[in-house]
Amino acid sequence: MTELQRKWLTFSSAIALGITLAFLLEIAILKAPVAAQATLNLESGEPMSQFNFFQAAVLGMVQGLTEFLPISSTAHLKAVPVALGWGDPGVTFTAVIQLGSIAAVLWYFWADLTQIATGTIKAFQKSDYQSQDFRLAVGIAIGTLPIVICGLLLKVFVPDLDNSPLRSMTAIALASIVMALLLALAEYLGSHKRNFEQLRKRDGILMGLAQSLALIPGVSRSGSTITAGLFVNLERATAARFSFLLGIPAITLAGLVELKEVFEQGFASAALLPLVVGLISSAIFSYLAIAWLIRYLQRKDTWVFVWYRLGFGLIILGAIALGKF
């Protein structure tokens, strides 16, 4: 099997999984009594509105582009549909279309993941613990622990996180502005000289700690990790590439947790086909965003994202002041 065939198999399998999950959601909804559905809507806080194909495709595009660009997918998925008058997408829609982003990052980095996995196995067999693949695997594993631990602590101490002030539009705007300033500082102070072969376990730890900040809506997982990478003098493209590899376990775990909660807590009525459209749109635009950002950062700096995040945060604050949010 060729590399392209392996990538396509991974991508299509993830898409098929998402479609299957969406189908199961639809069956569960149709079989639920009307009164029970109404109760679930009230308990989950998910909106009653349904999205048409165009709206689903647009929201899938928003998810795909903002999941990997350093501008926060959570913030945009909350702000964009509300600004357009479509309402909050809700837990079900967000959880399903996030599978598209997972499929895209696995597809794009399939060769890297295969190399890291096989190299780590060989390193164990030869006791070669200085192997680049082994060090990358350890860095990714260690870097994933902070966001897992912090996520579990948030679940325990802030059980109603979705409705907490931490997820308000004001908090999202302030987080966007603060992260813009930190990215500007990292861009200004960093030397940007260390390449992918010079990655160390310490980089995984530091970027992993930064990744845990993404639990705060508006921070951006890729934004926080790329910023941390620039602070430790990684090349911009290297920081982005390692950010995406580091994010694979975190994004996958987050998607599975959200889907688990959807099944446990109930969900509002949602059409199957728009979910599928949103899923596919998310996968396509996630892949394009990953490929574009890595190429872009090989030639240019991150200032465009600094100004965008500043503008995004200020616009939200202005809209809040005007009573639009």
Image (tube, grey):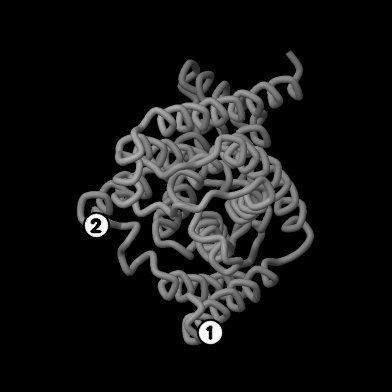
Seen from the viewer's position, the closer of residues 72 and 207 is: 72
Report crowding for label 1: few under 14, some 14 to 19, many 20 or more residues within 10 A (C-alpha).
Answer: some
Percent of width and height locating residue 238: 64, 51
Q: Compared to 242, does 259 lie above or below?
A: above
| Mark 1 vs 2: CB contact within 8 A | no
Please name the amino acid that badge 1 sits on.
Answer: Gly
Residue at 39 percent across and 28 percent down: it is 31
Q: Which mark is residue 318?
A: 1
Q: Earlier in the sequence, mark 1 or mark 2?
A: 2
* Residue denoted by label 2: 158
Can residue 106 be spotted in the picture? yes
Please name the amino acid that badge 2 sits on.
Answer: Val
Residue at 59 percent across and 60 percent down: it is 70
Q: Compared to 210, does 99 lie above or below?
A: above
Identity of the residue furthest to the left in this view: 157
Assign a secondary structure to mark 1.
Answer: helix
Please name which of the two marks, 1 or 2, marks the residue nearer to the observer. 1
